[in-house]
Amino acid sequence: MLPRIPDLHLRDNDQPDRPLRLMSAVRALLRERHYSRRTEETYVHWIVRFIRFNDRRHPKDMGIEEVRRFLSDLAVEGQVSASTQNLARCAIGFLYEQVLQIALPDIQGIVAAKRPRRLPVVLTPSEIRSILRHLEEPASVCVSLMYGSGLRVHECMSLRVKDVDVERREIVIRGGKGDKDRRVPLADAAIVTIKRYLRRATDAHRQDQRLGIHTTGMTAALLRKYPHADTDWPWQYVFPAARTLRDADGVRRRHHLHETVIQRAFREAVSAAGIAKRATCHSLRHSFATHLLESGADIRTVQELLGHTDLRTTMIYTHVLNRGALGVRSPADSL
């Protein structure tokens, strides 16, 4: 059991005189700053690993040397990637600077994990058509949207009905990576499919209303503003899960389809299509960006559609165009 923090200003709402325990305080501050639940679980994971690595000593009794040893051990013994090491560093920085309110100096002398340069896996249009032939709904609809709109798998799974505008041919992504909203195109080729799919989903929603089943992901503030949002059709997930769950208040709710369901179906379809590439659902997003650039789209437009903050992130797709990294013709073609 981790010790309590004696001088933390946060207090348990149920017992105001008792300070929150360490991990409860971490979670409370992450939620107060509107971090996503996925980020919350990741930060908690790395903070716990940091404490266990240092023999369960309280973080306020440790300092820069313990942080340096832990991050270096991740690279040397754990052989983690550079992004993983940086994520652990951010989590520990949050613990000290935000929770404990202890300023950490710049960490020097860390053995940095190697950051390999990898090019994205890009599928051809014919390969995508072949994959779609081996998929059934709802996986085929998900794959069509991920490729046609450049969606991440979680963005696709968490889509709500109100954010799919068939008339305007667009999809609004709410709270994407970095908690950013953006608009992306809805492909004309997907209109008939998505309309048919939503008609069937409407019938399932009526059944949920009769059974008193609500949707998930609704904050208390949102429900105060829209009291019936968790049962209204516009707020339902486009891809609801087959099973329901009961929350802490005893209300039965239906979450969205889990990402692994689509990832597994996509992996099986790639294998069935005889495609040798190491393709994942994220390859559809890579293919979306690459094919847009090949068709002459401006790279800044692609940056906006993908939701990239830094243009350098989008620039990687210029290295996988069919015309070559530098737009040159191979000398072997003249033989």
Image: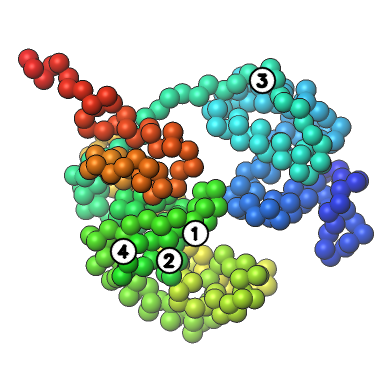
In three-dimensional space, the C-alpha distance between marks 3 and 4, rounded to whole angstroms, equals: 49 Å
Secondary structure at badge 2 equals helix
Q: Nearer the viewer, residue 253 or 181?
A: 181
Q: Which residue lies under the disc numbered 1?
A: 174
Q: Quadrant of the C terminus?
A: top left
Amino acid type, callout 4: Arg
Q: Which residue lies under the disc numbered 2?
A: 163
Q: Is residue 43 left or right of residue 183?
A: right
Query: At which x and y percent is residue 142?
Result: 35, 57
Secondary structure at badge 3 equals loop
In three-dimensional space, the C-alpha distance between marks 2 and 3, rounded to whole angstroms, equals: 44 Å
Q: Is residue 278 left or right of residue 210?
A: left
- Disc 3 crowd rating (10 Å Cα; few below 14, some 14-19, many 20+) is some
Q: Are marks 1 and 3 in contact (CB under 8 Å)?
A: no
Q: Which residue lies under the disc numbered 3?
A: 110
Q: Which residue lies under the disc numbered 4?
A: 169
Front: mark 1 or 3: 1
User: Residue drawn 69% across and 44% down?
Assistant: 44
In three-dimensional space, the C-alpha distance between marks 1 and 3, rounded to whole angstroms, equals: 37 Å
Amino acid type, callout 3: Ile
Amino acid type, callout 1: Arg
Q: Are marks 1 and 2 in contact (CB under 8 Å)?
A: yes
Say if residue 196 shows up in the picture.
yes
In three-dimensional space, the C-alpha distance between marks 1 and 4, rounded to whole angstroms, equals: 17 Å
Tell which circle, 1 or 3, labels the residue nearer the N-terminal end. 3
User: Residue drawn 78% across and 44% down?
Assistant: 99
Query: At which x and y percent is residue 202?
Result: 38, 77
Q: Nearer the viewer, residue 120 or 70?
A: 120
